[in-house]
Image (cartoon, grey):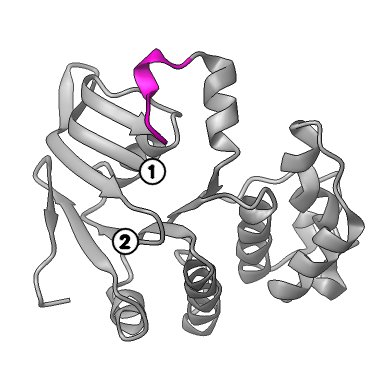
Amino acid sequence: MIELDNVAYSYGGAELFSALNLSLAPGSFHFLTGPSGAGKTTLLKLCYGELIATGGQVRLFGEDARAMDRNAVAQIRRRIGVVHQDCQFLDHLSVAENIALPLTVSGRSAQPSDVTDLLGWVGLTRQAAQTPPELSGGERQRAALARAVIMSPDVILADEPTGNVDAEMSQRLMALLLELNKMGKTILIATHDLSLIRTAKAQVSARVLRLKDRKLQLAGADL
């Protein structure tokens, strides 16, 4: 589905990583760890076409990312749901309208039942008419997850989805991501939370990847 072959990325004359290989197969579950500044967010951006590799090849659903025009990238992104670390919303729209926004932008009409079902799934039914500034950190993260899956993507990429919430909310968000994986979705989560990884690994067969010293490696059993 998403393949990185001998990929390198540099900016400002400095190489962030090189000789990086990664394959996200259908229905697989992956964690991405590593120190701050190692390039985890950059790697995720390569996986959904936000950035173009400076070396090697990135293939998104069989297509060379470097050869894609803007329309082709937009089409591919409908198959990839992204949960950003900073959870940006349009504050003048309601939570329900924000969740439905990807459908609106793509020219598809959002069915009220679809949005209602998603709000119920992430536990935000009572917050549907609220605006984003009225939400807590955990509620914003759940709204971001609902927005990421409204298009029924094949792949979910999450950048530190539990970074700004407490342990209980972290487990709740992970339960939702595990449920998506059981539905056949491919999951890649960038996180510093090793306890979250340990908990998830007890419930799903997950690969743990560590990005460090410009290389991507399978993490050891110490996790």
Which residue does the numbered mark 2 point to in the structure image?
30
Is residue 144 covered in magenta? no
Q: Please, what is the three-letter code of the amino acid marked with disc 2?
A: His
Q: x%, y% of residue 169?
A: 55, 78
- Name which residue lies at 11% across and 77% down: 222
Q: x%, y% of residue 99?
A: 75, 52
In front: mark 2 or mark 1? 1
Query: Is residue 85 in view from this perspective?
Result: no
Check the image and report above or below for 110 versus 31. above
Which residue does the numbered mark 1 point to in the structure image?
1
| Quadrant of the rendering where the N terminus is positioned | top left
In this rendered view, identify the residue nearer to me: 185 or 222.
185
Q: Quadrant of residue 64?
A: top left
- Name which residue lies at 39% across and 55% down: 26
Query: Is residue 32 in view from this perspective?
Result: yes
Specify which label sits upstream in the sequence, 2 or 1: 1
In this rendered view, identify the residue nearer to me: 47 or 186.
186
Q: x%, y% of residue 191?
A: 35, 61
- Name which residue lies at 55% across and 42% down: 79
Q: What segment carries the magenta color?
A: 61-68
